[in-house]
Structures are given as C-alpha cells and as structure tokens.
C-alpha cells in the first residue's frame, strides 16, 4: 500500500468513528445500548427462572441445575440461590453451592469453556474423579471414588467403556478465578472431606491443561473418609496452599508432575484407622492404627523443604498377609533436617512388636521389644526415589518363648521335631550409603529338646557373629561366627550320651540370593568326641562293634568346606587332629547323591560310602579306599594326599 493510500484509509476510518458521528446517530446508538442494558436483566433473569439457560447449556457432557431465585443485573454477573453443575468426560465432577455469586464470561461458553472470574458461595460441595484406563490393582481405590449420581450421559469410570457407549465429544475446560467459597464437602478421587472449610484462589482444568494459582484451603474441624463411609481421621484442622503452573497433565502422567508443584500442607488430625493402606497393598490387611497425626510439609517443585516434619503415634496396629501377621505399637517421625548433618531423618520405634508366621492352624511367634529404626536421606524428592546416606536398626531384645512352634514355618514332616526350648537374640545393624549393613548378632537357646530322626537330643545353644549384607548386591555374609553346643544329651534306644559339647567356628560364610542362589563357607569343628554320632549309627546296627574303640578317641577336630548352587550341595571334610582323622566328601544334586567318609585313627577306622542308594561300610578303611570312592564324584576330583587316618 502506498503512503497516500494509507493516509486516505485512515482518514475514512476516522470519519466513521463513533466520536465523529452526527449527533442524531450518537443518540440512536446510546438509546439502543440503554435498551439492551435495560432488557438484559429482564430477559436473562427470565431465562434463568424459566430454565431456558439450563436447556441451552445442556449437552451429552454438561448439565446445569439452577433453583430460583436467580437473577442478573450486569451481563455475566449472576446471583443464584442454589446451583448444581455436573460435568462428564475424562474428568468428571459435580459442583454444588448456595447463595452463589458468579461472574461468567458468557461468550466463551460457545468454545466449551466455563470461564469464571469471580465465584463466591456457601455450603459448597465438590466431588471429582477421572476415568481410568485399567482398574487392575486399584479396585479398592476406584470403588471409593465418588459415585457422581446424576451425571449427564453414561455414568461410567472405565475409559474404554465410555468410548463404547458415548460419542467422543471434546471435554469442557473450566477456568475459575477469584474463588472465595465456604465448603461442606470435598471429595477428590478416593478421599472425602466432610466439615467446614474455606477455599480461595483459582484453578484451570480441562483437556491437556491444568493450573492452580495460589489456592488456599482452610479446613476444619472436619472428618476425612476413604470413600463414602470409611472414616480415616476426625478433628481434622489445617491449611493447604498450592501453586501449579499451567501444564499438560498428559505429558506429566508419572510422578514427575510433582516437580512442578509448590505447596504447603499443615494439618492435625486424630487418625481412626490405617486400614486404608490395604487399598495400596492388595495382599495386605491392615486394621487398627488410631492415634494423633501432625503434618507440616513444605513442597518446592517436588522437593520437601528443611522445615517439613511429620509425627504419628499409635498404640496398636495389626498387619496380616499370606502366612504371617504383625502386631505392634508404632511411633513414626520425619524431620527434613533432623540429623546432625542436616539430612532428612526418618525414625520408627516400637515398645513391643509381635511377628507370627503361620502354616495351617499352627503359628510361630517372635517378640521384638524396644526396637528402633532410623534412616538418613540425601533429600526428599517426591518425583523419584531418594538416595540413602545412612541407616540403623536396633533390636536389643528378640524373644521366642516356645520353640516347639517352629515347625509351623518349616517342613512339618521333616526329620527334626522341636519339643521345647526358648530363644533370645539381639541384632544391631548400621548401613552406609552403598547399602552395606553390618553389626553384631547374638542368639542364645536354652533347654532345647529335639527329636532328630527318632533320636532324642537336648542341649543349650549359643551363636555370636558379625552380620554383613547388601540388599542391592544380594550378598549376605556371616563373619567370625562362633556356634557352641553345651550340655548335650542324647538318647537313642538303649544308648545314651550326656555332657557332650561341640564348637563350630567360621571366618566367613557367604550367601548370594541370586538365581540360582549360591553359598560358600568354611567351618572348623571341635567336639568332645564322636560319641553321639557313633551311638546313633550303632543304634541302627551300622557300626555297633566299633563303638568302644571310637568313644575313647577324645577331642575331635575337623574342618569342612561347603558349596551350594541351586540344587547342588558339595561338602568336603578334613580333620585337624594328629591323633585321628575324619575325611571325605558329600555331594548332592537333584536326585543324584554320593558320600564317602573315613573316621578313625591308626588303630581303628571305619569307612562309610553311598551311591545311588547303595550303602557300603568298610571297617579299618584307609586313604586308598577313600580316594577310590572320591574319584567317582562329579566335577574336579579332590583326593586325600596324606594318609587318612
């Protein structure tokens, strides 16, 4: 366009502008505007009271119910005694309130936008849920969603079912600002709040958009429920502030959404039960768990601030799963800067915890008294897992008052049956940032009475060792283990042994719980003699004629190396004694098993070998007999180089 043409066009516009109109024309337009403004409240108020507005807004996904009196004086600003808005779609909700003052941008309704610049109301109810793609694993949660009775269209929560029964219409976008309402009920997904509250701020929700602009919710006193009726907490009071920038929720469907949230949650409540936790762990039944809860969390883009803390205490909570149950009192504390290094600190403590393991109608119970667990974290980022800096477990008093119940968790038809006995233990573990945990373990068993394959055995047992384990590496070690048997008595038919003792020591035992699992370790064994073993064999008519000579060989010493991998077990035995020897190998892999052992001294010895179910007893067996059998074992052949015995 040339400069002259532009000037001519601007001059024409200027001549046609309202301020250049003739006086009569200005008067006509002013009169027309006044008539529109005078007619608007009459016409729109009539449309509100006659239900015309409700009919115009009605669609497959939207219904508005307005009760009279309802009126308007200025375009877009409406006052209603009672209104109910029902929206269907991917996001489904019901909004209901009284004495409502609404400032609405009317023209945006044609774009399926409900744009409210001011909303004030009393006695407000808001119930909201979203359609889900799959309910598997969240059945209890979905069952607790608000029913939203009266929704327009098909009232379904399964997204695939909705697509089959409804037209795929675009969702509505709801923009609300200038929010100042007094609530009586808020029901978001599975959580329902009933009580007093005041909400201020604004929000946007719709397809591919979500925003919360400095929303303030003052709640209390009120009641929190899981679903319609299950009470979670009473006497709830507090305040929630939140700010979420405009985002596409579909692009942040995972936990990364929390990295956009800035909020503070300050709440106090009397928790009535922790049973709702079972909705998030389908195989776990939780009951009881009432107690006071205090929460003050500062969330800055998904990260908990250093002033955040949480405190909860209950006198009794019960957990029940497949084959086990736990009963305890529980105190949980979280302090975002609670450690000396200003690291977030989580502590858990209990005066007494009872863990029961069950099989059928039998159960075995372990008591843990005065235990405490602690974890130091590098930070708390809700959108992803946090790194562990340090942790500790203190279990100073672990008790089992009756070991006869142990078969409830072992094979009930096994060769070992426990008649009686008590056990005490203590365990203290410290874990570093590489997830290596280490600490002492001690156990003491008193008055243990067993039936081992028909042989009565009684003894006192003690174990002390250093535990090292790493759950990430699936590695578990026992170091410097000392295992002792004292005051052992044995009765096998007409034969008896009393006052027998044995020590078992090991520098290192290692177990890898991979697939397949593996175990390696060495043991040093020292015993008064082999009296219990030999008399048990004699009772079965194996070596009865040699018993008098063997029991005179005192101070039995031997070492063994044990290796396992999956179904394979390989045990190599050699002695340390200069007076007499015990040597050989025991191998088992699935259905295949072999054994070759020689026990004795220069004067007398016996060899025991078995393969494929065939048992061989060789009196006065020596190294040559043993090596002949060892050469038949699978894998690397380990023959005895020195005379045995």
Image (spheres, rainbow, N blue to C red):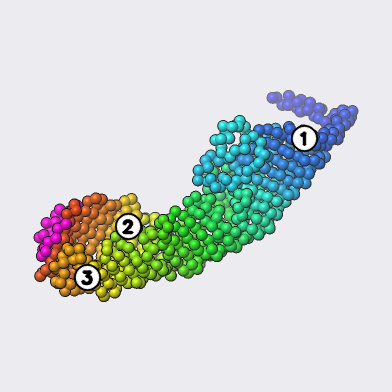
Highlighted range, magenta: 615-639
The residue that disc 3 covers is: 495
Q: Residue at x 34, y 57 (%)?
A: 411
The residue that disc 2 covers is: 413
Mark 3 to mark 2: distance in Å? 25 Å
Mark 2 crowd level (few <14, some 14–19, many ≥20, 10 Å Cα): few
Task: Evaluate whether residue 474 shows in this view.
Answer: yes
Tell whether position 546 is magenta.
no
The residue that disc 1 covers is: 51
Quadrant position of the N terminus in the picture: top right
Q: Residue at x 63, y 43 (%)?
A: 147
Mark 3 or mark 1: name the one nearer the start of the chain. 1
Q: Nearer the viewer, residue 358 or 165?
A: 358
Task: Evaluate whether residue 309 shows in this view.
Answer: no
Mark 3 crowd level (few <14, some 14–19, many ≥20, 10 Å Cα): few
Q: Secondary structure at mark 1?
A: loop
Q: Nearer the viewer, residue 292 or 444?
A: 444
Q: Secondary structure at mark 3?
A: strand
Q: Are marks 3 and 1 in contact (CB under 8 Å)?
A: no
Q: Residue at x 14, y 71 (%)?
A: 549
Rendering coords of residue 59 (x, y %): 68, 33
Mark 3 to mark 1: distance in Å? 101 Å
- Asked where in the image residue 450 lies, by quadrant, the reply is bottom left
């Amino acid at each position: 366009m040339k400069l002259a043409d532009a000037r001519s066009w601007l001059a024409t516009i200027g001549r046609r502008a309202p301020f250049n109109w003739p006086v009569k024309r200005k008067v006509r337009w002013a009169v027309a505007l006044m008539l529109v403004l005078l007619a608007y409240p009459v016409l729109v108020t009539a449309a509100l009271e006659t239900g015309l507005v409700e009919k115009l807004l009605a669609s497959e996904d939207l219904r508005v119910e307005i009760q009279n009196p309802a009126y308007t004086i200025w375009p877009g600003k409406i006052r209603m005694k009672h209104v109910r808005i029902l929206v269907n779609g991917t996001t489904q909700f019901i909004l209901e309130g009284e004495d409502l003052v609404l400032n609405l941008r009317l023209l945006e309704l044609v774009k399926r936008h409900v744009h409210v610049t001011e909303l004030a109301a009393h006695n407000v109810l808001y119930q909201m849920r979203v359609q889900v793609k799959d309910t598997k694993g969240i059945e209890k949660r979905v069952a607790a969603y608000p029913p939203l009775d009266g929704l327009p269209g098909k009232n379904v929560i399964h997204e695939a079912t909705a697509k089959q029964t409804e037209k795929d219409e675009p969702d509505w976008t709801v923009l609300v600002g200038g929010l100042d309402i007094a609530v009586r009920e808020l029901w978001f997904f599975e959580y329902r709040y009933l009580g007093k509250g005041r909400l201020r701020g604004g929000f946007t929700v719709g397809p591919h958009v979500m925003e919360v602009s400095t929303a303030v919710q003052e709640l209390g006193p009120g009641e929190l429920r899981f679903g319609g009726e299950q009470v979670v907490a009473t006497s709830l009071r507090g305040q929630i502030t939140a700010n979420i920038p405009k985002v596409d929720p579909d692009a942040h469907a995972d936990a990364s959404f929390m990295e956009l949230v800035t909020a503070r949650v300050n709440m106090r409540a009397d928790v009535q039960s922790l049973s709702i936790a079972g909705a998030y762990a389908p195989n776990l039944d939780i009951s009881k768990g009432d107690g006071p809860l205090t929460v003050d969390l500062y969330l800055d883009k998904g990260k908990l601030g250093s002033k955040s803390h949480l405190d909860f205490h209950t006198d009794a909570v019960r957990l029940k799963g497949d084959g086990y149950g736990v009963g305890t009192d529980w105190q949980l504390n979280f302090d975002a800067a609670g450690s000396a290094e200003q690291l977030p600190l989580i502590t858990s403590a209990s005066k007494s915890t009872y863990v029961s393991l069950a099989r059928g109608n039998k159960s075995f119970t372990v008591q843990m008294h005065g235990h405490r667990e602690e974890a130091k974290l590098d930070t708390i980022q809700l959108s992803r897992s946090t790194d562990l800096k340090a942790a500790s477990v203190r279990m100073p008093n672990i008790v089992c008052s009756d070991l006869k119940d142990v078969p409830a968790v072992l094979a009930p038809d096994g060769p070992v049956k426990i008649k009686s006995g008590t056990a005490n233990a203590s365990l203290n573990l410290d874990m570093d940032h590489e997830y290596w945990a280490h600490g002492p373990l001690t156990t003491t068993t008193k008055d243990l009475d067993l039936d081992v394959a028909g042989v009565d055995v009684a003894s006192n047992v003690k174990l002390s060792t250093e535990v090292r384990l790493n759950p990430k590496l699936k590695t578990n070690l026992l170091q410097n283990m000392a295992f002792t048997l004292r005051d052992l008595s044995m009765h096998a038919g007409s034969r008896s042994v009393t006052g027998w003792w044995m020590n078992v020591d090991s520098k290192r035992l290692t177990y890898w719980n991979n697939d397949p699992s593996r175990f390696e370790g060495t043991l040093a064994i020292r015993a008064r003699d082999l009296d219990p073993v030999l008399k048990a064999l004699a009772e079965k008519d194996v070596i009865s004629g040699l018993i008098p000579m063997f029991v005179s060989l005192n101070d039995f010493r031997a070492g063994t190396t044990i290796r396992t991998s999956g179904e394979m077990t390989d045990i190599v035995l050699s002695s340390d004694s200069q007076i007499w020897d015990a040597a050989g190998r025991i191998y088992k892999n699935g259905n295949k098993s072999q054994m070759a052992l020689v026990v004795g001294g220069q004067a007398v010895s016996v060899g025991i070998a078995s393969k494929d179910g065939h048992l061989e007893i060789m009196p006065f067996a020596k190294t040559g007999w043993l090596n002949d059998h060892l050469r038949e074992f699978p894998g690397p052949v380990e023959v005895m180089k020195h005379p045995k015995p």
